[in-house]
């Protein structure tokens, strides 16, 4: 459980923030669509955008497939067409996210926000010190880490940031990792190397939990693709 000092907003509002922010970023950087994305080495920025639209559409129309397994729709559309298409899904997205809660709701928000940060990093745009998606994403990601901790038979780990804390796993935590909410987000989404993870503020031996940071769709990269949050 977390006790956040920043305001929690509805999932739809957080998701809409990322959609609008990405449109602003692509507009400000006309050359962005063809740029590669180190955090997603098989994709260009336009591929990320196509992925987000594809996932959103399938969720609006109803799907039980894990969102990270939804294939992207055929590519080739211009960025303005993709954003126009994405905007048409807004009302359907709101209705879906106002239904009784499912993990898919938080996964949709977390995935879009993670890719927003991927794109910010490539464009040299500052990462957000605050964003309405942080509480939603971190509640979900620490839950996922807990499942991984249990599956590896590891002791519980406490995660802390200003205004919030979580325990991933069962029982009394055997260690604590503390960092800016942004560094925790990136650590839990396969965007940080083990060396970068170990460099956070730890109590306990961080290598104890190294295997747990590869879980679900996330894998710890061998080489750094971004720097820690600089404040």
Image (cartoon, grey):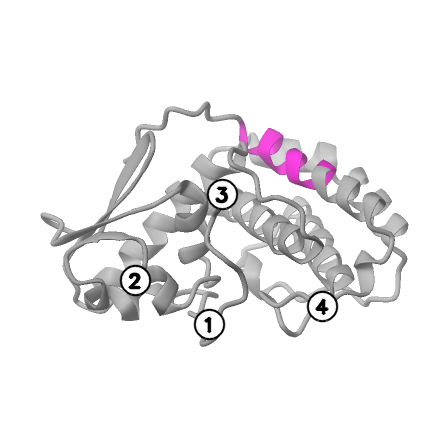
Q: Which residue is disc 1 drawn over?
A: 221
Give the extent of the magenta segment. 10-20
Q: On residue 36, which mark appears?
A: 4
Q: Residue at x 48, y 46 (%)?
A: 230
Decide whether residue 12 is among the magenta residues. Answer: yes
Front label number (1 vs 2):
2
Q: Are marks 4 and 1 in contact (CB under 8 Å)?
A: no
Alpha carbon separation for disc pair 4 and 1: 16 Å
Classify 10 Å Cα crowding around label 2: few (below 14), some (14-19), many (20 and above).
some
Disc with the residue nearer the chain's start (2 vs 3)? 3
Q: Which residue is mark 3?
A: 106
Contact between marks 1 and 2 (CB within 8 A): the answer is: no
* Magenta region, main secondary structure: helix
Residue 47 as seen in the image, left or right of residue 106: right
Q: CA distance from mark 2 to mark 3?
A: 27 Å
Disc 3 versus disc 1: distance between alpha carbons? 24 Å
Query: Dots 3 and 1: beta carbons under 8 Å?
Result: no
What secondary structure is marked by label 1? loop
Q: CA distance from mark 3 to mark 4?
A: 26 Å
């Amino acid at each position: 459980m977390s006790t956040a000092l920043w305001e929690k907003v509805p999932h739809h509002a957080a998701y809409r923030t990322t959609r609008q922010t990405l449109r602003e970023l692509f507009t400000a950087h006309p050359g962005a669509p063809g740029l590669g994305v180190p955090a997603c080495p098989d994709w260009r920025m336009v591929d990320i955008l196509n992925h987000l639209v594809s996932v959103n559409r399938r969720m609006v129309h109803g799907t039980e497939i894990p969102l990270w397994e939804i294939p992207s729709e055929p590519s080739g559309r211009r960025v303005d067409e993709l954003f126009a298409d994405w905007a048409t899904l807004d009302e359907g997205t709101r209705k879906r996210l106002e239904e009784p809660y499912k993990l898919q709701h938080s996964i949709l928000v977390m995935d879009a926000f993670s890719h927003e940060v991927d794109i910010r990093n490539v464009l040299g745009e500052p990462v957000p010190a605050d964003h309405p998606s942080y509480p939603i994403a971190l509640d979900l990601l620490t839950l996922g880490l807990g499942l991984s901790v249990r599956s590896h038979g590891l002791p519980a780990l406490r995660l802390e940031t200003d205004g919030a804390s979580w325990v991933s796993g069962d029982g009394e935590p055997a260690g604590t990792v503390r960092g800016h909410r942004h560094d925790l987000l990136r650590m839990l989404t396969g965007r940080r190397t083990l060396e970068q993870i170990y460099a956070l503020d730890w109590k306990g031996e961080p290598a104890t939990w190294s295997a747990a940071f590869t879980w679900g769709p996330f894998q710890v990269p061998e080489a750094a693709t971004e720097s820690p949050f600089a404040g």
